[in-house]
Image (cartoon, grey):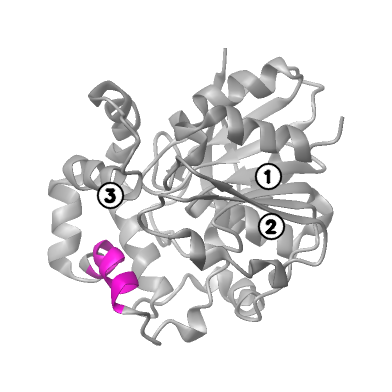
Amino acid sequence: MARLEQVHTSVLSIAFEQAGPADGHPVMLLHGFPYDPRAFDDVTVILNAAGFRTIVPYLRGFGKTRFLAAKTMRSGQQAALGHDLIEMLDALKVKNATLAGFDWGGRAACIVAALWPDRVLGLITCCGYQIQNILTATQPADPESELRWWYQYYFHTERGRAGLTANRNELCRLLWKLWSPTWAFDEMTFNRTAASFMNPDFVDVVVHSYRHRHGNAEGDPRYAATEARLAAQPKICVPTIAIHGVLDGVIPPQSSAGHEGYFNGRYERRLLENAGHNPPQELPKIFAQAVIDLCPH
């Protein structure tokens, strides 16, 4: 059974679930928006049975993760997520680990793999290279892509902030349906995750994340140096398996074609025919097998 624990970093008390043998190889499993650790429930069972220690944090703004100080900026920028992850590894005294994530969690994993590669033995990233190129954020994409990102532009407005506040469950349920069109989740499955959206910082962190990535909000100054490093689009040298759901309704599979140029080490891309944006919850056996294939034995 997973144990719910808390660990402090420089700005957060991070809630996380830990399971498996204490001396097993550590695997950090990282969710995105709008999801939570429930996305990895079936994955952790498989990995724990294979002898791995799993650590599944609630990202900032989700679940029981809390900011330590009221004055701290409720930033959702990519550098903040990367720092949360590396500081969590430090706090848990994990020398190095395999990182596996999707959406925001995949981005955090890519950042740590790129900037602190000595702490990462392997990387599972959904949708390939996920470090944002904010310097090019004002360049328009094709109209179909812009349509898929409607929710991001919605969050750029105060109407969107109010909508997320008042209708967070309805909006997030809609995103699940749009992004994973063949995933037949039931209401109980959604509600187990939706409890994490009641975090008091959820709306602020989400809104800032999408405004910052488009250049419409300033970042937290404490992460300015890291954002500058990420602007160079650093390459990733750790062994990597990139997973992409063919039916992903927000990041279609063609967008990760050619991402091997961002990786200097072993790189393998796996397309999942019957998965959308949430591969670990839609196809947990296949996701877990990718982790096992990558991990040291």
* Residue hosting label 3: 178
Earlier along the polypeptide chain: callout 2 or callout 1?
1
Quadrant placement of the N terminus: top right
In the rendered image, the residue lying farthest to the right is 297
* Residue hosting label 1: 99
**Eye-nearest disc, 2 or 1:** 1
Q: Is 105 left, or right, of 33 in this rendering?
A: right
Q: Which residues are magenta?
A: 143-153
Residue type for callout 2: Val
Residue 62 occupies quadrant: top left
In the rendered image, the residue lying farthest to the front is 273
Mark seen at residue 121: none
Q: Is 95 included in the stretch rendered in magenta?
A: no
Q: Residues within 10 Å of mark 3 (few under 14, many from 20)?
A: some
Determine the CA span between mark 3 and mark 2. 29 Å
Judged by its main secondary structure, the magenta piece is helix
Report the residue at 44% width, 51% height from top: 69
Q: Is 25 left, or right, of 29 in this rendering?
A: right
Report the residue at 19% width, 70% height from top: 157
Q: Nearer the viewer, residue 155 or 244?
A: 244
Is the Cβ of the residue at disc 1 closer than 8 Å to that at disc 3? no
Q: Secondary structure at mark 1?
A: strand
* Residue hosting label 2: 112
Residue type for callout 3: Leu
Determine the CA span between mark 2 and mark 1. 9 Å
Is the Cβ of the residue at disc 2 closer than 8 Å to that at disc 1? yes
Q: Nearer the viewer, residue 150 or 225?
A: 150
Q: Secondary structure at mark 3?
A: helix
Residue type for callout 1: Leu
Q: Where residue 176 sits in the image (x, y, percent)? A: 30, 43
The answer to whether any part of residue 5 appears in the image is no
Quadrant placement of the C terminus: top right
